């Protein structure tokens, strides 16, 4: 617990922006994750980088941990405090600091959410394309190296964060990267921090790459007879180099849940949801070429959603898929799996996963951003049913192991937190020890989000 002296130092720095109210501690001690931990000891709401640096010095003096908090939507316990500490909620550091339209760059604070950033950018003709569905914060998205539905075209946070301001464990403030399109200047500290899940430092500013809002957008749903046909269609589409903006897969169970939740009437078959961005001519040509590939793979129906409202409805439905699936089994909780395999192994990975889930007796609708080989099974377990939880965890582990066997990764986008720690050695071998060495070099007292990502010793 925090000592009186530590609390006094925190109060002197944050005043009433320090809270130990049980309700707020509780709210920062749970999230969307299936893993659980006790609430943190206190929560602070910084306004400036200088305050975050002072906080790091206070934590050094008194020896307590700091855990960053963006929107709390991470899925592997990333932002929880399993061994106590102070949560640093960035909600008040939520401003767009500068936009450089000619350079297509923006500098933002970490607490701004993806939707708020795009709202602020709407008059510039630019947008920030990384879209994890949840209205996550940019700081949390950088910390988890998030991606989502549009990554197949625009890349992940790794590709769209050009620079950072970071407060290190000892209170030093470093700046990484520049606004330039590229650099060969030494170790890539931006890349090191992106995906470090707050274990190496707290991000207080981000320089982002923006994209031009497309002149024309077209979206469609296409139904297939089998999952294999839908996935093979994705594989051929990607291999031919067609510039898809989104290519999402829903299995029939996901389609049923989405229809019920979002009032849609999609055929109860494996579905691809696709979107094209570009000029009117390029969109028409790409849609035509995709249509040919889809028909070759036995696409049954092709429904265009060209009007902005129809597209919005379609992607709202996709973004609500998680809630729709949860609602399909009232009283259940979800273990959300997240594997990513090379595109050539996608069909095998999805088929084997499907068979494994069917044999388990646990409901596990499958969906994913299959254009980049990334898919999820949402394993639904009755809340409090230990036997179902054990079956689901074993399924999730087998999914991760299958992904590794096929040349993939244990997490395509959600990250490690402490939920995926037991799988890290299998993916990285000695490389995981190197991650631990980097952590010790930057945070020798293990005060930055301890218990996550690296080997625990
Ligand atoms: C319905 C649903 C759908 C999702 N879909 C996707 C998806 O398609 N793609 C995807 O990538 N993810 C997805 N996620 C997971 C989640 O949205 C992402 O991991 C997101 O990037 C987390 O952002 P956040 O702001 O909620 O971060 P939080 O959950 O608050 O924190 C995540 C991690 O970042 C750290 N952190 C937060 N802020 C900072 C900071 N300023 N400095 C340093 N560390 C910090 C935290 O300590 C923690 O380790 C989904 C989640 C849900 C619930």
Image (cartoon, helix red, strand yellow):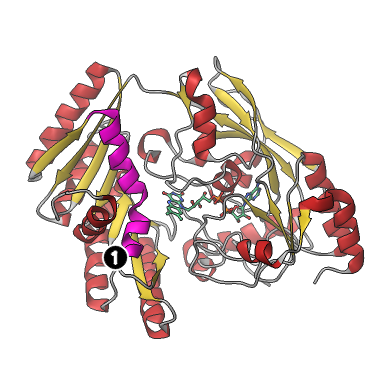
Q: Residue at the spot x=15%, y=37% of the render?
A: 303
Q: Mark 1 Cα within 10 Å, few/some/many (few <14, many 20+)?
A: some
- Give residue 388's quadrant in the image: bottom left
The image position of residue 184, as x and y in percent, is 61, 29
- Is residue 358 at least partly visible in the picture? yes
Q: Residue at the spot x=71%, y=69% of the render?
A: 84
The image position of residue 304, as x and y in percent, is 18, 34
Regarding mark 1 in the picture, which secondary structure is present there? Answer: loop
Residue on which the image places disc 1: 328
**Total of numbered circles in the picture?**
1
The image position of residue 89, as x and y in percent, is 68, 51
Asked if the residue at label 1 sits under 8 Å from ligand 1, the reply is no
Q: Residue at the spot x=32%, y=58% of the render?
A: 324
259, above or below 113, in the image: below
> What residue span does the magenta drawing correspond to?
306-328
Q: Name the side, left or right, on which 191 lies relative to 269.
A: right
């Amino acid at each position: 617990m925090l000592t009186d002296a530590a609390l006094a130092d925190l109060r002197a720095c944050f005043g009433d922006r320090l809270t130990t109210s049980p309700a707020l501690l509780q709210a920062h001690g749970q999230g969307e994750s299936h893993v659980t931990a006790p609430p943190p000891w206190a929560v602070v709401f910084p306004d400036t980088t200088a305050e975050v640096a002072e906080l790091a010095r206070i934590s050094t003096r008194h020896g307590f941990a700091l855990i960053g908090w963006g929107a709390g939507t991470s899925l592997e316990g990333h932002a929880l405090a399993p061994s106590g500490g102070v949560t640093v909620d960035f909600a008040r550091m939520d401003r767009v600091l500068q936009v450089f339209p000619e350079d297509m760059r923006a500098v933002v604070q970490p607490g701004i959410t993806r939707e708020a950033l795009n709202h602020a950018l709407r008059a510039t003709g630019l947008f920030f394309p990384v879209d994890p569905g949840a209205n996550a914060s940019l700081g949390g998205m950088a910390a988890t190296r998030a991606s989502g539905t549009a990554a197949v075209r625009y890349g992940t946070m790794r590709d769209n964060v050009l620079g950072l301001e970071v407060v290190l464990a000892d209170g030093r403030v470093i700046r990484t990267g520049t606004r330039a399109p590229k650099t060969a200047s030494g170790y890539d500290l931006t890349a090191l921090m992106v995906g470090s899940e707050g274990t190496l430092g707290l991000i207080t500013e981000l320089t982002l790459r923006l994209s031009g809002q497309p002149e024309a957008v077209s979206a469609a749903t296409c139904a297939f007879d089998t999952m294999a046909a839908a996935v093979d269609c994705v594989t051929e589409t990607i291999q031919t180099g067609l510039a898809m903006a989104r290519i999402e897969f829903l299995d029939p169970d996901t389609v049923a849940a989405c229809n019920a939740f979002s009032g849609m009437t999609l055929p109860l078959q494996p579905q691809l949801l696709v979107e094209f961005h570009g000029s009117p001519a390029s969109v028409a040509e790409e849609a035509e070429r995709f249509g040919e590939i889809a028909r070759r793979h036995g696409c049954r129906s092709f429904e265009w959603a060209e009007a902005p409202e129809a597209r919005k409805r379609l992607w709202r439905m996709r973004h609500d898929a998680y809630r729709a699936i949860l609602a399909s089994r009232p009283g259940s909780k979800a273990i959300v799996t997240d594997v990513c395999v090379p595109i050539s192994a996608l069909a095998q990975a999805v088929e084997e996963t499907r068979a494994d889930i069917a044999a388990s007796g646990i409901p596990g609708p499958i969906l994913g951003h299959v254009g980049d080989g990334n898919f999820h099974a949402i394993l639904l377990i009755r809340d409090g049913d230990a036997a179902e939880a054990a079956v689901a965890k074993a399924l999730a582990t087998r999914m991760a192991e299958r992904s590794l066997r096929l040349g993939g990764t244990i997490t395509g986008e959600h990250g490690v937190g402490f939920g995926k720690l037991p799988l890290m050695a299998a993916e990285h071998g000695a490389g995981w020890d190197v991650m631990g060495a980097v952590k010790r070099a930057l945070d020798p007292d293990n005060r930055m989000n301890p218990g996550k990502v690296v080997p625990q010793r």
